[in-house]
């Protein structure tokens, strides 16, 4: 049995008087796509920041975090809630920021390919403000992919988008899969996370130990998005956030289309169960059909 790619054991995070996360324990396997859902303020972003090694200076944490490293640095790329594109750089330069800092070889060649695949070809010289919301998010995702890291940490990347755009972004994300990919077998260093139409899986574990397979951890408020994309969904409790439920989602995201009504019900029930009396998960006036928490 393979060791997990990343593991979190008994993670606790506190900001002064606020206990944000308590005893969070989970792991993520090679090639796995894991979604984390939970009510607003329960500590989802904090867990992601902890995985990225980006907790703010004042935070105190305990527990164990084990993420893959490359060249002495965590081998992770983090996409924050807001796309954080640099407004004074054109789309092309924005896309290459992380890759250049990381010294990714052949980043320009790869970027050209990804602009095409992400539907951004022709917009290389556009300024961020000239792009639509969906295009900006695709560019931010492209930049994260291009950074060539083994683990992608995505913090509610589509939260600000309308439902249709969000759905198409889900399709983009479902097209991500990791290397050992046919593109270049990971040889470019970027190929560890590649984009292709064939599969949503993040690269099947290879018999020799899946050395190249990476993983995605996605924070989302949207139960349907989690079910559409993830192999496994982790449910966090209200703050201080703990992992209170773990649900495996059968099937590949490319073939899957809202095919799990029973899991949807189970996840919503898990969220409701742990909701506080103020109804923070889903305000009583909010339509249930949105399935957002
Ligand atoms: N830098 C910080 N300083 C102080 N408190 C913080 C800081 N970052 C987060 N917190 C607190 O920690 C708790 C968890 O915040 P976090 O952003 O991780 O929640 P979340 O589940 O991601 O929320 P949302 O879904 O609304 O984005 C919140 O009570 C928040 O106010």
Image: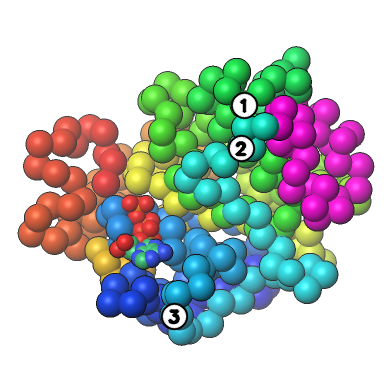
Q: Which residue is mark 1?
A: 128
Report the side of 127 relative to 22 (left or right). Answer: right
* Rendered residue at 78%/40% (across/down): 96
Secondary structure under tag 2 reads loop
Secondary structure under tag 3 reads strand
* Rendered residue at 33%/70% (across/down): 20
Q: Which residue is mark 3?
A: 60
Mark 1 burial class by Cα count in 10 Å: few <14, some 14-19, many 20+ = many
Secondary structure under tag 1 reads helix
* Rendered residue at 44%/75% (across/down): 59
Q: Which residue is mark 2?
A: 85
Report the side of 285 relative to 1 (left or right). Answer: left
Residues 203 and 167: in front is 167
Q: Which residues, given as a range, are shown in magenta?
A: 89-116
- Outermost residue on the top side: it is 122
Q: How is the image coloured?
A: rainbow
Residue 104 magenta-highlighted: yes
- The image's mark for residue 277 is none
Mark 3 burial class by Cα count in 10 Å: few <14, some 14-19, many 20+ = few
Residue 45: where, in percent of width, then height?
43, 58
Callout 2–callout 1 Cβ contact below 8 Å: yes
Residue 128 magenta-highlighted: no
């Amino acid at each position: 049995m393979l060791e997990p790619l990343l593991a979190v054991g008994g993670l606790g995070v506190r900001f002064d008087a606020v206990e944000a996360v308590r005893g969070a324990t989970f792991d993520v396997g090679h090639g796995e796509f894991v979604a984390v859902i939970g009510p607003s303020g329960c500590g989802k972003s904090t867990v992601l920041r902890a995985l990225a090694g980006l907790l703010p200076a004042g935070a105190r944490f305990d527990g164990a975090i084990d993420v893959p490293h490359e060249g002495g640095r965590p081998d992770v790329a983090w996409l924050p809630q807001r796309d954080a594109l640099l407004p004074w750089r054109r789309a092309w330069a924005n896309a290459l920021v992380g890759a250049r800092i990381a010294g990714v070889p052949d980043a320009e060649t790869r970027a050209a390919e990804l602009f095409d695949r992400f539907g951004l070809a022709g917009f290389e010289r556009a300024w961020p403000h000239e792009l639509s919301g969906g295009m900006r998010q695709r560019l931010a995702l492209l930049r994260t992919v291009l950074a060539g890291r083994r683990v992608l940490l995505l913090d509610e990347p589509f939260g600000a988008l309308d439902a249709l755009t969000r759905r198409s972004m889900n399709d983009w994300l479902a097209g991500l899969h990791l290397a050992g990919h046919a593109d270049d077998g990971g040889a470019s260093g970027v190929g560890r996370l590649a984009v292709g139409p064939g599969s949503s899986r993040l690269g099947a574990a290879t018999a020799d130990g899946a050395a190249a397979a990476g993983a995605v951890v996605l924070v989302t408020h949207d139960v349907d998005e989690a079910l559409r994309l993830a192999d496994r969904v982790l449910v966090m409790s209200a703050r201080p956030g703990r992992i209170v439920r773990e649900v495996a989602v059968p099937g590949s995201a490319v073939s899957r289309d809202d095919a799990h009504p029973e899991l949807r019900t189970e996840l919503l029930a898990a969220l409701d169960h742990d909701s506080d009396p103020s109804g923070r998960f889903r305000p009583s006036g909010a339509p249930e059909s949105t399935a957002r928490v």
